[in-house]
């Protein structure tokens, strides 16, 4: 078995280890400013270091296998972790973790399926796992915010929603404005980021390609695809989450589930 990649890995870790000086600077500044987050900074870096190192070995193994089963297992693992994280953000939404999981799965699967069918990306570990990981992470944030915002908006306007229901409106009609506001708020960072690409920041995918030796023109081609897929997956996933949230806020007789809006 070829172990040259392992030697290259340890050789390449010299620069990341040297970059520890930046984290040390942050810890020192926190200490002298009495912020009390020295441990948090150190723990965050240590955890990121371990997680990235482990995933590096895992991906190396999967890339060598080039097996569709491994691709799907990694994808489902990422969706599961993202669902839990988004569910924690919207913890007061009934079955929030499952709603988030189904929404993330729907948005990213539909988007990735289109990309594979249109032959934008081949169905191989080297392409599918990093690309789907970007979509899952972005969708996780958007869906978590959308679910939390919808629940909070309905809670703030309980009387308005109940009045609409009393006048014969369906749950969808009674909460249409709250849903729109939740979707707009959740999707705004994604859209704002797309508007400022190349003007304020050079995104990670583009920067990575340029630093890896690719031409800027090749890098922007990939970044355009990445931006499109992030917008698509986030939009589909957030809309699905809204449809899945509605039933948990109302009874079968079209009355508000008041217990959902009691705790904070």
Image: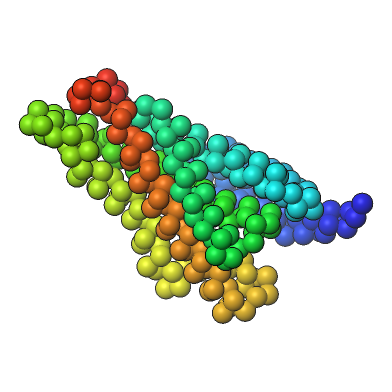
Q: Is residue 90 above or below residue 123?
A: above
Residue 69's x, y, as percent?
A: 70, 44
For the view shown, which residue lies furthest in the front direction? 117
For the view shown, which residue lies furthest in the left direction? 167
**Colouring scheme, one of rainbow, by chain, secondary structure, one colour:** rainbow
The quadrant holding residue 121 is bottom right
Relative to residue 168, is residue 253 drawn left or right? right
Kindly identify the residue that appears in the image at 41 percent across and 65 percent down.
194
Residue 35's x, y, as percent?
A: 47, 41
Kindly identify the residue that appears in the image at 47 percent across and 68 percent down.
201
Q: How many marks?
A: 0
Q: Nearer the viewer, residue 152 or 121?
A: 121
Q: Nearer the viewer, residue 120 or 214?
A: 120
Q: Nearer the viewer, residue 237 or 188?
A: 237
Residue 116's x, y, as percent?
A: 58, 59
Residue 196's x, y, as percent?
A: 39, 68
Q: Is residue 178 above or below residue 214?
A: above
Relative to residue 87, is residue 171 drawn left or right? left
The answer to whether residue 252 is seen in the rendering is yes
For the view shown, which residue lies furthest in the right direction? 1
Q: The C terminus is located in which quarter?
A: top left
The answer to whether residue 262 is seen in the rendering is no
Kindly identify the residue that appears in the image at 28 percent across and 45 percent down.
182
């Amino acid at each position: 078995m070829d172990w040259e990649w392992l030697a290259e890995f340890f050789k390449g870790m010299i620069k990341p280890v040297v970059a520890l000086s930046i984290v040390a600077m942050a810890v020192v500044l926190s200490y002298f400013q009495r912020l009390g987050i020295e441990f948090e900074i150190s723990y965050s870096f240590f955890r990121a270091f371990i997680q990235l190192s482990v995933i590096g070995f895992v991906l190396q193994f999967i890339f060598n296998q080039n097996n569709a089963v491994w691709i799907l297992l990694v994808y489902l693992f990422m969706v599961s972790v993202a669902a839990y994280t988004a569910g924690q953000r919207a913890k007061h939404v009934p079955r929030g973790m499952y709603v988030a999981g189904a929404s993330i799965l729907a948005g990213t699967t539909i988007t990735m399926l289109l990309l594979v069918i249109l032959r934008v990306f081949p169905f191989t570990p080297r392409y599918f796992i990093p690309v789907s990981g970007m979509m899952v992470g972005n969708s996780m944030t958007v869906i978590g915010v959308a679910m939390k915002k919808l629940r909070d908006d309905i809670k703030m306007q309980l009387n308005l929603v109940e009045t609409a229901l009393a006048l014969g409106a369906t749950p969808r009609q009674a909460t249409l404005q709250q849903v729109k506001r939740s979707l707009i708020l959740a999707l705004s960072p994604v859209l704002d980021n797309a508007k400022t690409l190349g003007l304020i920041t050079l995104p990670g995918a583009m920067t990575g390609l340029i630093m890896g030796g690719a031409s800027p023109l090749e890098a922007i081609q990939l970044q355009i695809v990445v931006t499109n897929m992030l917008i698509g997956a986030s939009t589909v996933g957030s809309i699905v989450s809204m449809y899945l949230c509605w039933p948990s806020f109302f009874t079968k007789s079209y009355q508000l589930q008041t217990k959902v809006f009691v705790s904070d």
